[in-house]
Image (cartoon, rainbow, N blue to C red):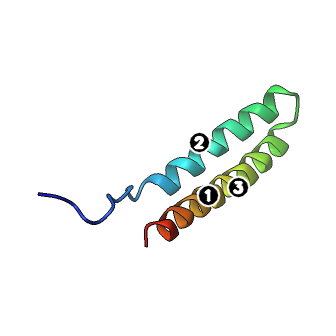
Amino acid sequence: MIQTEPQRIGCLIFPLSALAAFIVGSLFSAAIGFSAFTSTILGLVCAGIGILFVWKTLKRDKAGSD
C-alpha cells in the first residue's frame, strides 16, 4: 500500500526538544561558571528557543509539501 500522506513525526518532538535544549543550555552555562539560578534561567530560555526552532522547521516542511 502506497502512502500519499507524509508520516507523522509524533507528539513527543516538542517536549523532547525542549528537554534536550534545557539540559544542554543549563549544563553549558553551569560549566562556564554561572550560578545555579542563572543556569536554570538560561536553560529555560534555551528550551523556548528549541521549541521555536522545531516549530519553524515543521511549519516549513508542511508548507513545502502542498
Number of other residues with Cα within 10 Å of mark 1, as a class: few under 14, some 14 to 19, many 20 or more: some
The type of residue carrying mark 1 is Ile
Residues under labels 2 and 3: Cα distance?
A: 11 Å
Q: Is residue 38 left or right of residue 43?
A: right
Residues under labels 1 and 3: Cα distance?
A: 5 Å
Residue highlighted by disc 3: 49
- Quarter where residue 5 is shown: bottom left
The answer to whether 31 is drawn above or below residue 55 in the figure is above
User: Who's the residue at 37% across and 56% down the image?
Assistant: 10
Helix, strand or loop status at disc 3: helix
Helix, strand or loop status at disc 1: helix
Q: Say which mark, if any, is on residue 51.
A: 1
- Quarter where residue 1 is shown: bottom left
User: Who's the residue at 54% across and 67% down the image?
Assistant: 59
50 or 25, which is in the foreground? 50
The type of residue carrying mark 3 is Ile
Residue highlighted by disc 2: 20
User: Who's the residue at 43% across and 67% down the image?
Assistant: 65
Q: Position of residue 33 (x, y in %)?
A: 88, 28
On-image quarter of the C terminus: bottom left
Number of other residues with Cα within 10 Å of mark 2, as a class: few under 14, some 14 to 19, many 20 or more: some
